[in-house]
Image (cartoon, rainbow, N blue to C red):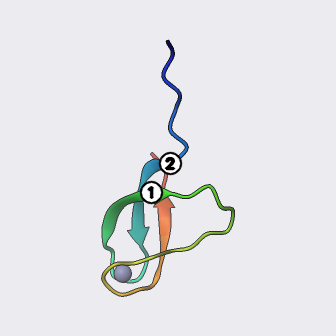
Amino acid sequence: MQVLIPTTTIGWWLCADCGAEAPLPIPDISGYVQPCPDCAAEMALVCD
Ligand SMILES: [Zn+2]
């Protein structure tokens, strides 16, 4: 039996304000903004 790829994947997020990085889920919502756990600024998804 084949294992399905989970819909919730984890990605690395980078805060442009304080430079914090965190592995957080990538929600399946377009335009979703991940708040920084340190300063609550918008985080950007790091693509590698
Ligand atoms: Zn921050």
Q: Where is residue 45 in the image (x, y as percent from the top left)?
A: 49, 60
Q: Nearer the viewer, residue 14 or 35?
A: 35
- Name the residue tied to disc 2: 8
Task: Please identify the quarter of the rendering in which residue 16 is found.
Answer: bottom left
Q: How crowded is mark 1: few (under 14 residues within 10 Å), some or many (20 or more)?
A: some
Relative to 37, residue 32 above or below: above
Under tag 2, what secondary structure?
A: loop
Looking at the image, the residue that sits furthest to the right is 30
Q: Residues within 10 Å of mark 2 (few under 14, many from 20)?
A: few
Task: Please identify the quarter of the rendering in which residue 12 is found.
Answer: bottom left
Residue at x 49% of width, y 12% of height = 1
Relative to 7, residue 36 above or below: below
The C terminus: image quadrant? top left
Identity of the amino acid at label 1? Answer: Pro
Q: Going from the N terminus, do you reach mark 2 or mark 1 first?
A: 2
Looking at the image, the residue that sits furthest to the front is 1
Verify CB contact (< 8 Å) between mark 2 and mark 1: yes
Task: Please identify the quarter of the rendering in which residue 17 is found.
Answer: bottom left
Horizontal arrangement in the rendering, residue 18 relative to residue 41 (left or right) = left
The Cα–Cα distance between marks 2 and 1, rounded to whole angstroms, is 6 Å
Residue at x 56% of width, y 58% of height = 27
Relative to 39, residue 8 above or below: above
Under tag 1, what secondary structure?
A: strand
Q: Position of residue 37 (x, y in %)?
A: 34, 78
Identity of the amino acid at label 2? Answer: Thr
- Name the residue tied to disc 1: 25
Q: Position of residue 7 (x, y in %)?
A: 55, 43
Number of numbered labels in the structure image:
2
